[in-house]
Image (tube, rainbow, N blue to C red):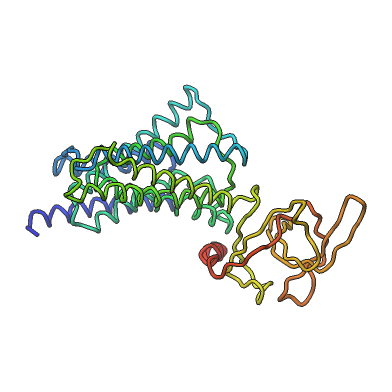
Amino acid sequence: MRYGYKKSFIVINCILVISLVFLLLNVFILKQVEFWFCGLATLIPFIIIALRYGYESRNRRFTYETMFYIFSFTIVYLIITYMLGISTGFNLTIYRLNSTNFLTNIIPYIFVIISGELLRYEIVRKCDTSPLAYILVTLILIIIDCTIYLTTFDLLTGDGQIKYICYIILPSISKNCLLLYTTRIAGPYPSLIYRTLTELKNFIIPIVPDFGMYFESVILTIIPGIIGFMIYSSLKQYQNKEVEGKTLKQSKFYIYASIIVIIVAVISLVLLSCCRFKYGMLSIGSGSMTGTINKGDAVIYESLNKNNVPEKGKIIVFRKEEKVIVHRIIKVVKVSNTETVYYTKGDANKTEDGYPIPTKDIIGIVKKRIKYIGYPSVFLYEMAKK
């Protein structure tokens, strides 16, 4: 590496480190969450780097193909989620499409998106051989996402912390890894398209599908990875010299196959994770059923229906106050002609639970145990409680 390039890398990394430290100080001390502030946090280092080393805008080899793919895949993903919302229901957002919302939220957030992607592109262009710069700019953009939602959750409680990690931090990491990849291969435009479609919709569309926070965090974390893989698979054909010069029409197979994979993945996640459907999945966070179901396992349960009713000896998933518990039915008591209550006990517990469970509090009946796959969510929850 020539001395001039090495020096420029050091200067750029120093600028990024200063920006990162400033953002961390803001998170822990200043707690400024305004969109304009977050936009300036990336615009200022971008301007400094561009003025010092120049700004070059040039389309990369796969710019138009990647723009097309990311637009197609993202639109399909959004359509599927809103169609599934017809079954799960919708929640109203706090935003309305009016001039006030446009001036106070939409325009400032567009500023956040554009300034962030300009900085990302500038780093990719000038530091393509510096992994440290990639890491720093990605951390900066993740922290900005975290800053925007800093006051949305009660971070003084373990529950608020786990929701913040699952709903904000993990999806942001996944999203920024995808956008770093698309920026490297195609420039800033695919990233701008993706963020505009997925993030601005929150301010424009007054309803969002009600999948529950847990499921929504899962899908927000997984979908960027699926889209990235589909883009990689679709563009791989162009890297083969024998097929160079192919048009998008000639690559329909890749597009259709990718869209089908996204459809199947989204629908499968909804059907498995959302309690409003026939089957659901739950991680086990205690040892009360050890031997039958261990801590860190996951269970698949079936919602109650006329062919799936609680009986003595069955393991059920039920709500008790704000907790979801998985225990075995040890006694069934018919209180009246229309009401039955159930008494339960954990297989590893010495005593029964000691309270009746009405039918309305039973979520479903356990059908299958899957070993170990619940450990990640259990670990995050326990870390948040400390």
Front residue of 241 and 152: 241
Residue 364 place in picture, x, y as percent: 70, 56
User: From this viewpoint, which residue is outermost toward the right?
Assistant: 336
| Residue occupying image coordinates x 39% and y 29% | 107
Please name whichever residue, 93 or 291, is drawn nearer the observer in this view of the structure: 291
Residue 368 percent location from the top left of the image: 63, 65
- Name which residue lies at 56% across and 53% down: 160
Look at the picture and state if 161 lies above or below 250: below
Q: Nearer the viewer, residue 262 or 253?
A: 253
Q: Nearer the viewer, residue 259 or 348?
A: 259
Q: Quadrant of the C terminus?
A: bottom right
State which quarter of the image contains the N terminus: bottom left
Tell me what residue is drawn at x 22 percent, y 40 percent.
Answer: 246
Task: Check the image and name the residue furthest to the top.
Answer: 99
Percent coordinates x, y for residue 82 in the rendering? 53, 37
Residue 120 higher or lower than 102, as above or below: below
- Horizontally, is 263 left or right of 136 in the view? right
Horizontal side of residue 350 vs 53, given as left or right: right
Q: How many marks?
A: 0
- Indicate the position of residue 322 as horizontal and vertical percent values: 69, 55
Instruction: Report whether 58 appears left or right of 42.
Output: left
Q: Looking at the image, is 296 positioned above or below residue 70?
A: below
Toward which corner of the image does residue 76 lie, by quadrant? top left
Residue beneath the point at 24% across and 40% down: 63
When asked about the image quadrant of residue 35, the answer is: top left
Q: Is residue 337 left or right of residue 151?
A: right
